[in-house]
Image (tube, rainbow, N blue to C red):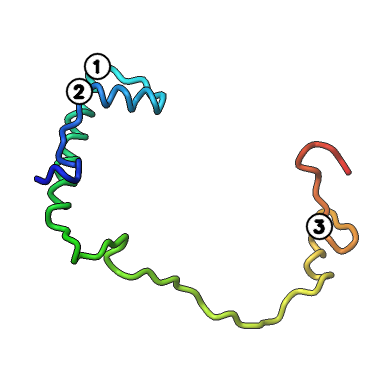
């Protein structure tokens, strides 16, 4: 494992306590010990990946290209203003009338 990446260093319980303090997370001694082991394992795996992923391997965020699936817009018949307001509980000046969300009527 390469020491230049810094990923191969083992994490200490002091580091976990420090990070928990920064995140304002209360951890028990058992949780600190467990997280220390888990984070050390994660760093070891990251170091292994860093060994294989050389400069000739491009970084990727997704293994396959993402594509936004949309349908084409098609102009169709739309409701008239009168049709859209026909079943509204309350309408004024060609708009739906609703109560104020802040509790103050305008």
**Disc ID at residue 92:** none
Question: Looking at the image, which residue is at 15% across and 40% down?
Answer: 8
Tell which residue pokes out farthest to the left in this image. Answer: 1
Secondary structure beneath label 2: helix
Outermost residue, top direction?
29
In the image, residue 65 sits, relative to residue 18, either above or below, namely below
Q: Is residue 2 above or below residue 20?
A: below
Q: Nearer the viewer, mark 1 or mark 3?
A: 1
Q: Are marks 2 and 1 in contact (CB under 8 Å)?
A: yes
Circles 2 and 3, Cβ within 8 Å, touching? The answer is no
- Dot 2, crowdedness within 10 Å: few (<14), some or many (≥20)? some
Whole-Å distance between the Cαs marked 1 and 3? 58 Å
Give percent across and percent down for residue 5.
19, 45
Mark 1 surroundings: few (<14), some (14-19) or many (≥20) residues within 10 A? few
Q: Position of residue 59 (x, y in %)?
A: 27, 61
Q: Secondary structure at mark 3?
A: strand
Indicate which disc residue 29 carries: 1
Query: Mark 3 sits on what residue?
Result: 96
The residue under label 2 is 33
How far apart are the two marked residues, 2 and 3, measured between alpha carbons? 59 Å
The residue depicted at 21 percent of the width and 35 percent of the height is 39
In this image, 8 relative to 32: left or right? left
Q: Position of residue 88 (x, y in %)?
A: 80, 58
């Amino acid at each position: 494992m390469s020491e230049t990446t810094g990923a191969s260093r083992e994490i200490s319980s002091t580091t976990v306590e420090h990070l928990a303090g920064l995140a304002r997370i209360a951890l028990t001694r058992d949780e600190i010990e467990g997280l220390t082991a888990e984070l050390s394992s994660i760093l070891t795996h990251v170091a292994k990946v860093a060994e294989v992923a050389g400069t000739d391997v491009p970084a990727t965020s997704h293994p396959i290209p993402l594509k936004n699936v949309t349908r084409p817009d098609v102009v169709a018949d739309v409701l008239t203003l009168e049709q859209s307001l026909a079943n509204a509980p309350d309408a004024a000046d060609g708009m739906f009338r609703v109560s104020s969300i802040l509790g103050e009527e305008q």
